Amino acid sequence: MAATEVEITRDGLDRAEMNINMGPQHPATHGVFRMVLTLDGELVTDVEPHIGYLHRGSERLSEDENYQQIITLFDRLDYIANFNNEWVYVRAVEKIINAEVPERAEYLRVILSELNRIASHFLFYGTYGLDTGAMNPVMIGFRERERIQALFEAVSGARMMHNYFRIGGLKDDVPDGFVPATRVLLDQLKAGYDEAKNTLTESEVFIERTAGVGAISGEQALDFGVSGPVLRASGIDYDVRKNFPYSVYPELDFTVPVGKHGDCYDRYMVRMLEIEQSLSIIEQALDKLPEGPIQSRVPRIIRPEAGDVYVNGENPRGDLGVYIVSVGHHATPYRLKIRGPSFCNLMALATMMRGSYIADATVILGSLDIVLGEVDR
Amino acid sequence: MAFFGAGALKGLMVTLGYLRRKPYTVQYPEEKLQISPRFRGNTFVWYEDRCTGCATCAKGCPLGIIKIVTHPKPNPQVGSDYQVDVFDIDTGRCMFCALCVEVCPYDALHMGADFERAVPARQDLVITVDQLREMPKKPTTQFRPQLEAIDYKGEEELEEHEAGRWSL
Amino acid sequence: MTEDRPASPDDAEEPAGAAISDPSDGSPFETRLRETLGDRISEISTNVDELQVRVARDQLVEVCEVLKESEGIDFKYLRCLSVVDWDDDKEAEVVYHLASMTHSDKVVLKVRVSTDDPWLPTVVPVWPGADWHEREGHDLFGIEFHGHPNMTPLILYDGFEGFPGRKSFPMPEQVTFYGGD
């Protein structure tokens, strides 16, 4: 029997580009973030991020509020790392009014901010586990973060929106028993960190999912203004705490973990190693914590001289900058610009995502660890 | 690594270890976590006799959600010369920054520690002066170091003369 | 900018030309910067711990390229790009905060434009990271960045009227109480 040749035409099967809308209400976008993916089959050819769904006009709002009240707005920017946000802002105001900060306050700020960094990285660890398809990490991550937040509650009265740092110091001294409680917490965190590490770091499933995915070179990342763990994962050793040292960080001994490949796995590893470093920083700071006042004398209503100042600090997500313009003798800033690290990191998203599979889209987005409160401001 | 899958197995061993552990979470309505004395809830504690109606709290509020109306007392006895008629705090828009508490020069306003205040309508979230009078006088020690100095844990009600930096 | 401009509050703080006539406090970095930029600087001053350089609009991109590529300067990192509106919205100032990772130096570039003709050349070709900052500046302050590859609304929705970052944009009155007052 002679085989009939069937001619298969490929008409109508032309490869057409397809647009897929992801978000704004999507669990894997970590907030109200929307990206329009252009797909060629399963490959992502282009991404267009859309932001602004959470725009609250923090910058404009702060032009109508006096310098102390603005601290509350900074709590709500990057709502995972509130202490770090407050710190950058109060440092900016301290610089413009040239205020001193007592040493004890500086050490307490370091301790609290580094704890907040650990909490933020644990949250990243948990949600990133979810993004890559692992259910277990989110339990560990949230549990450890919960422990830290319980300590924050004892210190500042709130788990997240602390409103605790003040211009020239802190609102109140930490409660009695803070140092022993923190030491106990550190031990718990170390145990939790080991668990977290054992669960994900060496897991082949996780490595296959993340290694080599969403890579970006150091030069490209720098061009986009990327900072924080994302930049360091690409091999550029830039940490504001080291490059432009502030507070008492020069007196503390720590290293900055730097990655090599700039892929998702390196970003994950940099954050995990940062937890180790932060634990060590807190231990040193607890040992060195001096007694003394926690608030220097600053005017009740702050009216800085005319001038402008840009201050940045290392947030868990990167380099948070605050630009304050004062026109002199006003209780409110004339202009306040916030440079959010997630905002700048997101710009590199398209470069990272082009050419990867659509299944990796959430993995790449998750590895940036964005917080939309700070992207949209 | 010894063999492919050893890392994943290591992770599974962590999970297995949880079989012999107690749960970390609590079942909320039945059990409650202990809150710290500084915890800011969404109620307020107001000592009327300490209050002069100066409305510093209203000015200190970043959102402007406190409204105070006063009139002079005909025959002042204790506290201020002004009677507070309206003291509305719109907790529907409140962000519990406690700046109103911090700026109060007479320690008349404190944060309360109650957090179970669900209401059916948004209007009910406004705390009026009558509600303020009736709220349990259990201030948190947030921004009130003098309460920490007497080792107050928020368990019993405090009188006016105990709550401030100076007594009436 | 050298042409007459309306008095703005920061004039009082840094009298024009004062810094140029006083090169004595020149740090090695400042000397390097002066050598590299030459006459492209219209004014240089020190603010707290940062050098502020005023440049003219037509020379902006050139200055940026020089700052990024020159040996010994290496401002590879655009930290921040902010727009400030001055003098009842008559002028806008665009501020570029630059940092160099290799030398741990920082510098501030300032360009002034009039709001009647609010355009600036884009610096996206120099630092791609300026992209969203410029789009935000366009959204909130109405500055046109000529040559920007994708000038679509970033933060505001399509069809939004006005520039909410400007001082002249009316802020909505405080929302009243939920109590209906």
Image (tube, coloured by chain):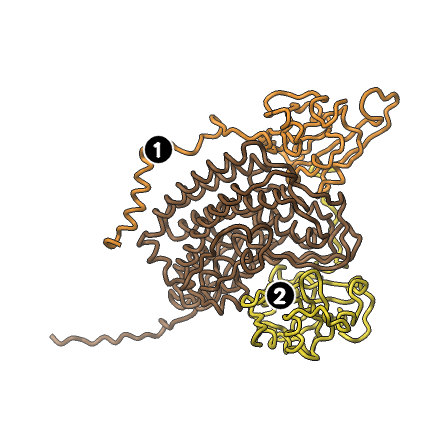
Chain colours: A brown, B orange, C yellow
User: Residue A155 appears at what percent x and percent y?
Assistant: 58, 36
Residue reaching furthest to the bottom: C39
Residue C106 got which mark?
Answer: 2
Instruction: Check disc 2: other Cα within 10 Å, few if <14, some if 14-19, many if 20+.
Output: many
Q: Nearer the viewer, residue B128 or A234?
A: A234
Q: Position of residue C90 (x, y in %)?
A: 79, 66
* Residue at the extreme right of the image, as rendered: B74
Instruction: Name the spot of residue A16 as percent of width and height, x first.
Output: 41, 70
Q: Amino acid at mark 2?
A: Lys
Which residue is more in the foreground, B71 or A164? A164
Left or right, A336 with respect to A7, comes to right
For residue A161, which numbered disc appears in the image?
Answer: none
* Residue A12 visible here: yes
Choose top left, top right, bottom left or bottom right for residue C110: bottom right
Q: Is residue C103 above or below residue C39?
A: above
The residue beneath circle 1 is: B21
Which numbered disc, 1 or 2, marks the residue closer to the eye? 2
> Could you say where residue A70 lies in the image, as x and y percent from the top left?
68, 48
